[in-house]
Amino acid sequence: MNAQGANHTRVAARQLQRALYRAAKASPTRRFHALYDKVYRKDVLAKAWQEVKANAGAAGIDERTIEDIEQSGVEGFLEALATDLREGRYRPRAVRRVWIPKPDGRQRPLGVPTIRDRVCQAAAKVVLEPIFEAEFRPSSYGFRPKRSAHQAGEQIRETDLSVGLHLQNLPFVEWLGTLFGRQGLSQTGTQKSCERKRGELRRAAHHGGCT
């Protein structure tokens, strides 16, 4: 893809995100029924690829790297993924399990998906993120674009609080599981999107497994 084509796909994907954000902002209780076909749009997958490439990262269980895909052809790779998604043949691979040492001597498990699955996840994020972003409060920082935990900590330090404050470093995923449980987390997503195919894609990702 040449520079002009790449720029066009970025603009088209951004326009889609803005339209979804405005729709969600205008109607907070709206449930979106037609999102799955947006995930395999050419511009969305192209944006997803650029995000995955920018994040770099290791290969998944198939040992296929970003460099391998670039050598064999990115456009063909994205077209094949789009076809599998469109025709309902897409199935995520198991993630590769690695262990990251922690300062206290313990190890944190990390699952490394294949590049193909990471592109699919990023494409779903391109479509879903603006819908949920419309509901967040200005004080929300976690897992939001252009926001970080460091910014949240700085905001706390700049705020004059009349009550005592205690900050605790917690394993976020474990805390969420305790608070909501797996079913509760799944239901959170369905409150905004009730599309059957999107739900099937999410459940497939949950049951991909680790090796």
Image: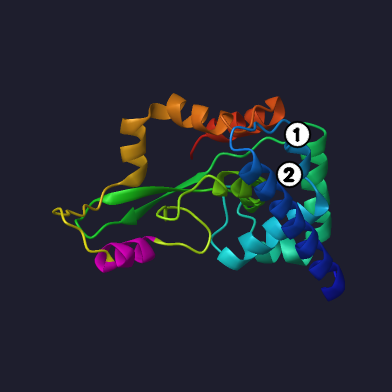
Q: Residue furthest bottom?
A: 3
Rendered image quadrant of residue 195:
top right
Q: How is the image coloured?
A: rainbow
Q: Secondary structure at mark 2?
A: helix
- Label 2 amino acid? Val
The residue range painted magenta reads 149-158
Disc 2 + disc 1, Cβ < 8 Å: no
The residue positioned 57% from the left and 56% from the top of the image is 59
Numbered marks: total:
2
Q: Earlier in the sequence, mark 2 or mark 1?
A: 1
> Image point 37% across, 42% down: which residue?
173
Q: Is residue 46 visible?
A: no
Picture quadrant where residue 104 is located = bottom left
Taking depth in this image into account, of 102 and 141 the one nearest to the observer is: 141
Q: Which residue is mark 2?
A: 39
Viewport quadrant of the N terminus: bottom right
Q: Is residue 14 visible?
A: yes
x then y, percent, for residue 152: 35, 61
Q: Is residue 57 above or below residue 193?
A: below
Is 55 rendered above or below residue 105?
below
Judging by the rendered image, the residue that carries numbered circle 1 is 34
Q: Give whichever of 191, 200 is nearer the camera.
A: 191
State how far apart marks 2 and 1 are (Cα): 10 Å
Q: Position of residue 86 (x, y in %)?
A: 81, 37
- In the structure shown, which secondary structural element does the residue marked by tag 1 occupy? loop
Three-letter amino acid code of the residue under disc 1: Ala
